[in-house]
Image: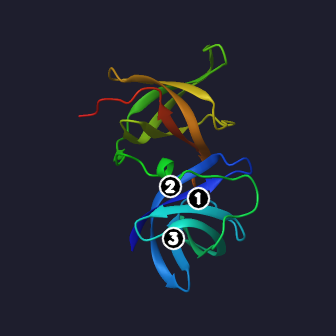
Amino acid sequence: MSAVYLTRVDEAGAVREQERTSSEPLGAGGVAVTTQLALQVGEVVWLVGNDVTGWASVTRTQPDGVALRAELQLLSAPPPGPAEVNPERERRAEERLVLKLGVDLSRLGSGGETLEQDRAVTENICPRGARVRTTLAGFRVGDRVALRERRGSFRTGAIVRGAYAGPDGMTRLNLEFDEPLALG
């Protein structure tokens, strides 16, 4: 087993969802991963890890408790279409810390005005970003948000880099902070 970043990319090449998981070799250019992402057979994903980097096609999926076990076949060439992923962008410079903070999440309009608010929770965090669980839905990559810790001084603006529904049906946002935070 080795660590790998599994990335779903839309038709325009934008990162839709990303997850850090582990992979195990299956032989003949195949790997298996356990994921929270709702992968579909035939879908093409991007993998980045120490033992495997490149495009892979989902060949089989099987429920594995609350997760999904997916078998992937590595592709010898990029899939057709405009999707381009920068492998260096997919690796995080820092590991995310599992840290549950109660935050007020504000969806911002183009002028910076607050459109919606929610009492949300961070699931993990690092100096450059976080994953946040929220009851709000309909986020798109590129949306702007603001975060404010309810019981502390942590405040930041961020851009949505990925949004998906978790197994519990709640929205997860992968956020990139406007400025790196000093976590210590």
- Circle 2 Cα neighbour tier, 10 Å, few/some/many (<14 / 14–19 / ≥20): some
- The amino acid sitting under disc 1 is Leu
How packed mark 3 is, by other alpha carbons closer than 10 Å (few <14, some 14-19, many 20 or more), is: many
Q: Give the image quarter of residue 59.
A: bottom right
Q: Is residue 38 above or below residue 136?
A: below
Q: Can residue 7 be seen in this view?
A: yes
For discs 1 and 2, the disc positioned in front in the rendered view: 2
Amino acid at pointer 2:
Glu
| Mark 3, secondary structure of its residue | strand
Q: In this view, does 34 lie to the left or right of 38?
A: left
- Classed neighbour count for the residue bearing mark 1: other residues with Cα under 10 Å, few (<14), some (14–19), many (≥20): many
How far apart marks 1 and 2 lie (CA) works out to 8 Å
Query: Which is nearer the eye, 119 or 40?
Result: 40
Name the residue that disc number 1 marks. Answer: 37
Residue, x 50% and y 55% (percent of image)?
19
The CA distance from mark 3 to mark 2 is 11 Å
Task: Give the residue furthest to the front.
Answer: 77
First of labels 3, 2 by sequence position? 2
